[in-house]
Image (tube, helix red, strand yellow):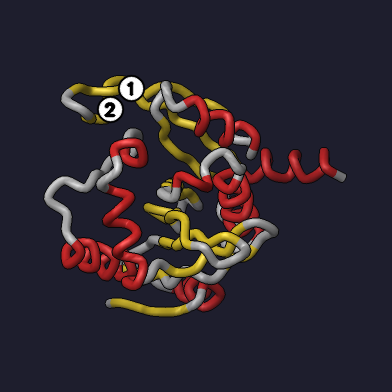
Amino acid sequence: MYFEMRVFSLLQIHKYTTNIQIIMIAPILKSEKVLLKPINIKEAKNYLAWFNDPEVTKYLTTDGKDLNLKKEREIIKKSRLRPNEYVWGIYTSDKKHIGSTGLHKLDFKNKTATWGISIGAKDYWDKRLGTDTLNTIIKYFFTKLKFNRLQLFVNPTNLRAIKCYQRCGLATEGIKRKAKFKNGKFNDMIMMSIIKDDYKNLKNKKK
């Protein structure tokens, strides 16, 4: 059984039902620097170009191998129908499409999810747009979804990303040894997370 709804209705239904697969429609989120909109087929050409750039895909699980525009459009269609998941296109305040981000494996019982991001427009690297995107997601995650734990996985050599996640309040929990196969070898992955109590403490410090 599938439902298509905004999160306030979704949470009510989940409270009173079991064994339901839920199609999640990502809400529009806005901050000072970024605008997050549900991923759209019109963005496919951008993703195709980015996924064929080795610099962009260096730390991603995917790359442009065997990818074409038709396949990318199908991937986007499927991502919009994937149960228990939100996927957004990332836009700057002046409406420039620069990447994508998502909440994956949303677990309504344990109130957990896994987060990921890719900023493909390299002209916008090192402008803290990833930081602003993550802060926007974190605020939504804890204040609107009212979940308890957000986690992510990052390559130990991806120092720029790790610094970004630390700025947003995520803590390192440990290392998953040889957890990801990339570029012909198995790579360790660092697990980082932020829980609701961490978020509350960060808010109190800023007061």
Amino acid found under the numbered disc labelled 1: Asp
Left or right, 9 with reference to 102: right
Check disc 2 and give the amino acid type: Ala
Q: Mark 1–mark 2 contact, CB under 8 Å?
A: yes
Local SS, label 1 = strand
**Residue at 52% from the left image edge and 42% from the top image edge:** 125
In what quadrant of the picture does the N terminus appear?
bottom left
Q: Position of residue 16 (x, y in %)?
A: 46, 73
Residue at left offset 48%, top offset 40%? 151
Q: Position of residue 41 (x, y in %)?
A: 32, 71
Q: Is residue 109 left or right of residue 139?
A: left
Labels in figure, total: 2
**On screen, residue 40 above or below 51:** below
Residue situated in front as seen by the camera: 166 or 63 = 63
Q: Quadrant of residue 195?
A: top right
Checking the image for residue 179, the label placed there is 2
Where on the picture, by quarter, is residue 194?
top right
Which residue is located at x 60 percent, y 59 percent? 34
**x and y, in percent, of residue 88 in the image:** 45, 62
Residue indicated by mark 1: 188
User: In the depicted view, which residue is nearer to us: 107 or 25?
Assistant: 25
Q: Relative to 194, say whether 156 is above or below.
A: above
Image quarter for residue 82?
bottom left
Question: Which residue is at the front of the view, 205 or 125?
Answer: 125
| Residue placed furthest toward the front | 123
Classify residue 106 as left or right of residue 150: left
